[in-house]
Amino acid sequence: MLAILISIIIFALLNSALAASAEQWRGRSIYQIVTDRFALPAGVDINACDPGKQTWCGGTWKTIRDNLDYIQDAGFTAVWISPVNENYDGPRSPYGDAYHGYWSADVSKLNGHFGTAEDLKALSAELHRRNMYLMVDVVINNVMAITTTPDFSNYMFKDQSMYHQYCPIQWGNITSEQRCWLGDEKVPLPDLDTRNPTVIEQYGKWIQNLVEEYGIDGLRIDAAQHVQMDFWPPFCATAGVFCMGEVFGGLEVDEIAQYQGPLGFDSVLNFPMYSALVEAFAIPGPQNITALTHVLAKSKEKFKDTGLLGNFLENHDLPRWHNRTVDPQSLYNAMVLCFLTEGIPIVYYGQEQYFSGSGDPYNREALWTSAYERTDAYNLMSTLNQLRNFLINNTDWLLQETEILTSSPHGIAIKKGDVISVTTNIGSPPQEGTHIAIPSPYEASTATTNILTCQQWVVGARGMLDVEYTKGGVPFILVPTHSLKNSGLCEQISPKTVTARPISATQCSIHLVTILPAISLLALSVAFLF
Ligand SMILES: *[C@@H]1O[C@H](CO)[C@@H](O)[C@H](O)[C@H]1NC(C)=O
Ligand SMILES: *[C@@H]1O[C@H](CO)[C@@H](O)[C@H](O)[C@H]1NC(C)=O
Ligand SMILES: *[C@@H]1O[C@H](CO)[C@@H](O)[C@H](O)[C@H]1NC(C)=O
Ligand SMILES: *[C@@H]1O[C@H](CO)[C@@H](O)[C@H](O)[C@H]1NC(C)=O
């Protein structure tokens, strides 16, 4: 009896220490943080952070831990933080200080600007207590210096022979992209020789120890295509956790897709989908929905597993969505697709606060200036997470493939499992006469609920659903009402209090007209400010 008890306890301990696999990450949803910019300790001047100054603003692992409610309340189940290892800390470089964590020097030590080993362990433990995962960004390809002939004595790799010789990258030449140095002559990023057996061995020991010591559940891998691909599978196997590689790219699926699978990573960041969402939804922009349908089809064909890709609209290298497009409906519609197609949704901190910085360094705003307000975008991502988490916990939604039900120049309707998402690029202004007719697989008269407004929509003849944009280009998420039982979404509204009214016998749909869509009204009032 005692033996059984002990073995149960040992099993539980082992289990809680077990790092997370791809399968465990599939159902997660990630909030990406620039550690220096997420939260300040009490008593510090909240107006002092100017991203243009490219220096530290004061965020730490402890301040992240103290403010996890903001992330968890929005339904996220994982947090991705900046690289945690010691960075270049010499004289200020022409591009400022290493506040972002990507300027590696000695990866065997932690970055003192972000706290102590105890602080990082406490963050990890607190995330696990909340049933959330910790994803850590790692920089393997390169270190940083302010000369092309650096002294490596303060770096983990001290010997010159462990680095490739300096050469500027010749873009488009894959050998050059892997061997030459990222950065430029002002801030060169010395390139490790990742074929050198000593480098491979030391990196292996380091990552295994880092993951174990700090209870890390997953890695985001910086500049992954700048290292030869065969470096990665053994590296990630040694780490023993889920790996998501950053393979920078555009609409082209083929090049990026080859990095996913047994010869590459569990997952890569979904740059093709990001680029396609910009093509389709940015206002102004090409507003090319075909680009999106192409990428979705091509992705299904080429990627090993679209369900593990990291879907995003922003990150620390790209302009904020709101910098391209001030119309909030553009953001909301694109967000719906990030969460409700295949893939792991990722929200870059501040997206929910409509931050609008252009590229680096203006896209690394201090979150505290927002007062962590529960904005419409915050509420939207909370609702999307709540629906997704509920479906993942209670149904086989994750395993269902996304189908495109219909697309037109101004919108696309997709179905994954029980969820029909209808998105448009027309923006906030109402458009009389613009509508999308969606063939659903549901029987006529099936009650569905738009979870964004809690309005009921009844399926029309031949399974048709009809969405009109007389209130502006809002997204619709329609779920059979019975499937929402126990979800906490729209359950307070009993069908009896809602009146559905047929528009006409020829139109194959029934619209609810008693409640105005709250989101479109709010969005319109925001849009009119610009
Ligand atoms: C590509 O880059 C490598 C490494 O710098 C170089 O040796 C090679 O000549 C380049 N190839 C071409 C076609 O320029
Ligand atoms: C829209 O995207 C498709 C697919 O990428 C492309 O073939 C087409 O030329 C694009 N149309 C416009 C107007 O850019
Ligand atoms: C985009 O960012 C740049 C630099 O931060 C800023 O000057 C510009 O006003 C931004 N555009 C919008 C629409 O916010
Ligand atoms: C899903 O299940 C996990 C683990 O049992 C639980 O912590 C979480 O609250 C559930 N979420 C929802 C939305 O049901």
Image (cartoon, rainbow, N blue to C red):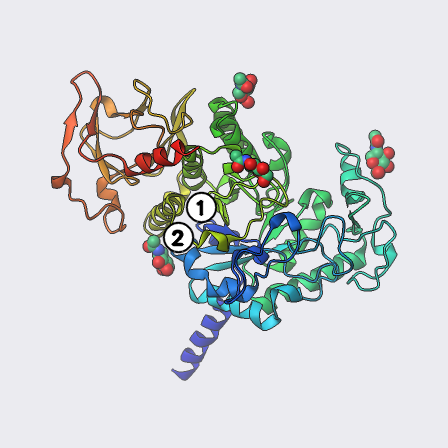
User: Height in image: 38 above or below 230?
Assistant: below
As displayed, is residue 424 above or below residue 101? above
Which residue is under mark 2? Answer: 74
Q: Give SS at disc 2.
A: loop
- Say whether residue 80 is left or right of residue 440: right
Is 499 situated above or below 288?
below
Q: CA distance from mark 1 to mark 2?
A: 10 Å
Asked if one can make out residue 99 in the rendered structure from this viewpoint, the answer is: yes
Q: Position of residue 35 (x, y in %)?
A: 57, 57
Number of the label disc, if any, that sits on residue 474: none
Q: Quadrant of ligand 2?
A: top right
Whether pointer 1 and pointer 2 mark residues with C-beta atoms closer than 8 Å, the reply is yes
Residue projecting furthest to the bottom: 2
Tag 1 secondary structure: helix
Residue 241, can we see it? no
Instruction: Name the side, left or right, on which 218 lies relative to 378.
Output: right
| Residue positioned 56% across, 44% down in the render | 315
Q: Amino acid at mark 1?
A: Glu
* Label 1 crowd (10 A; few <14 / some 14-19 / many >=20): many
In the rendered structure, which amino acid carries the disc numbered 2? Ala
Q: Which mark is residue 352?
A: 1
Residue 326, image x and y in percent?
Answer: 47, 34
Residue at position x 33%, y 19% in the image: 434
- Which of discs 1 and 2 lies nearer the camera? The answer is 1
Q: Work out whether mark 1 precedes mark 2 in sequence or the reverse, and give the earlier one.
A: 2
Along the line of sight, which residue is nearer the eye, 32 or 526?
A: 526
Horizontal and vertical percent position of residue 395: 33, 47
User: The N terminus appears in which quarter of the rendering?
Assistant: bottom left
